[in-house]
Amino acid sequence: MQISPSQSAISIPQLQTELTGRVIGPEHPDYDAARTVVAGGVDRRPAVIVRVADTADVARVIALARETGLELAVRCGGHSGAAHGVVDDGIVLDVRDLRDLDIDVEGHTAWAGAGLTAGEYTGAVGAHGLATGFGDTGSVGLAGITTGGGIGYLVRKYGMTIDSLLAAEIVTADGEVRRVDAENEPDLFWAIRGGGGNFGVVTRFQFRLQDVPSIVGGMLLLPATADTIAGFIAAAEAAPEELSTIANVMPAPPMPFLAEEHHGKLSIVALICYVGDAEAGEQAIAPLRALATPMADMVRPMTYPEIYPPEGEDYHPIASARTMFVDRVDRDVAETILEHVGASNAEMAVAQLRVLGGAMARVPADATAYAHRTSRILVNVAAIYGSLDEKPAHETWVDRFVEALRQGDNGAYVNFVGDEGEAGVHAAYPDATWARLAEIKRRYDPTNLFHLNQNIPPAVGA
């Protein structure tokens, strides 16, 4: 068997003696499972995967990347749309085994290991009637969603995930373990609240916890027409901040609770979360239900952890997707959405609409590296299909759809940016934010060791 340069640069047996965590090489029986990410059509083969056990392991793996010159990928939940959590012939630093969770119920804070998922954390703190807002998917790793921002079911009531971040422990490119917060290395703390994985490997987060003893939430399916789409967005914008919604305009999937006559019909598949008591929640949701006779109504009082249903681990979609912001979804915009979604021949085509505002919009734009605080509606356009051979056609569909929706807001949410090059990444950061991030990158990672991410290159010169 021919030995690649990457394999010859790394001694698996030596690493096993140096590290506490698991070392998985190409011959290991768990190698294929360990290199698999959520995105489909990805078949990258790293030289080694290290599931680190502590900060000492993290520092040693970072040093190994510096010493060998091999590319370093960092992963947790593996949800990166660009599959940044795995790399050919390089090193994967996997934080999934950093799972400690210390909940201070009285103090309403929690220290959480970066390897926990949003669902695991939410379930544990939810047992105490507490919550921190993450996204809409329970299997997402805390590290990725937090460092990118975090826009989910509590965003209008309690802001983004980064608005609940009090402190973090991070290992930087020099191998130093740093505690960062508003008082300690505040520039680095600012940068990891929206700047992604550019600045080091976060190993622990301290989050603020909110009292969320109950919600009214679940899925509501409505027929998708220009009137119902525009009406849904208008009602969501007018709703109290306790209500956050995600409206997916798409052909209705063949879900077991949905009558067969509705399968494949253009629908609003809405995910709804009202933070508060049942009576107030029913009143807030009533305008959405009144838009049309629901095709299915699964909205009910529940505990917050129930908003994250079980997920299939074997689902690895191949997708073409873009993210953007718009200022309005009126009837004309709704017609554009219906036209494009209806014209796609993908296995699934969707336009996802998230009304923002509320608590997240009251945070000053320069308070964190996520700067799009006044953007009104987050839109994600996606086509999911079965083969990479189909990609060019679906990429064209996505590009045309995005251009048809384009309004005055040219920003982007970095957690939903795919493999779009520097221009795609730069859209996530206004020029002043980008310049500040590049300068912080120069200070903490001058050689751009952490570049397998939505990369912000270090500033040049002093």
Image (tube, rainbow, N blue to C red):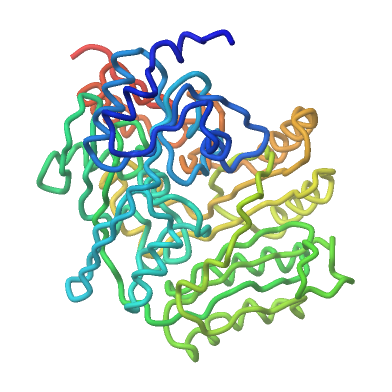
**Which is more toward the observer, 206 or 218?**
206
Spot the residue most to the right.
261
**Which is more toward the observer, 305 or 344?**
305
**Which is more toward the observer, 370 or 410?**
370
Q: Quadrant of residue 19?
A: top left
Screen quadrant of the C terminus: top left
- State left or right for residue 171 relative to residue 229: left
Up-down relation of residue 291 to residue 48 (above or below): below
Percent of width and height locating residue 367:
25, 47
Q: Quadrant of residue 68?
A: top left
Percent of width and height locating residue 50:
39, 33
Q: Quadrant of residue 100?
A: bottom left
Up-down relation of residue 270 to residue 428 (above or below): below
Q: Residue at x 22, y 26 (%)?
A: 444
Percent of width and height locating residue 272:
56, 71
Up-down relation of residue 116 to residue 448 (above or below): below
Q: Residue at x 74, y 30 (%)?
A: 388
Percent of width and height locating residue 263:
84, 65
- State left or right for residue 210 relative to residue 352: left
Total number of numbered discs in the rendering: 0
Q: Residue at x 43, y 82 (%)?
A: 214
Screen quadrant of the N terminus: top right
- State left or right for residue 252 relative to residue 166: right
Spot the residue most to the bottom.
279
Q: Residue at x 43, y 55 (%)?
A: 117
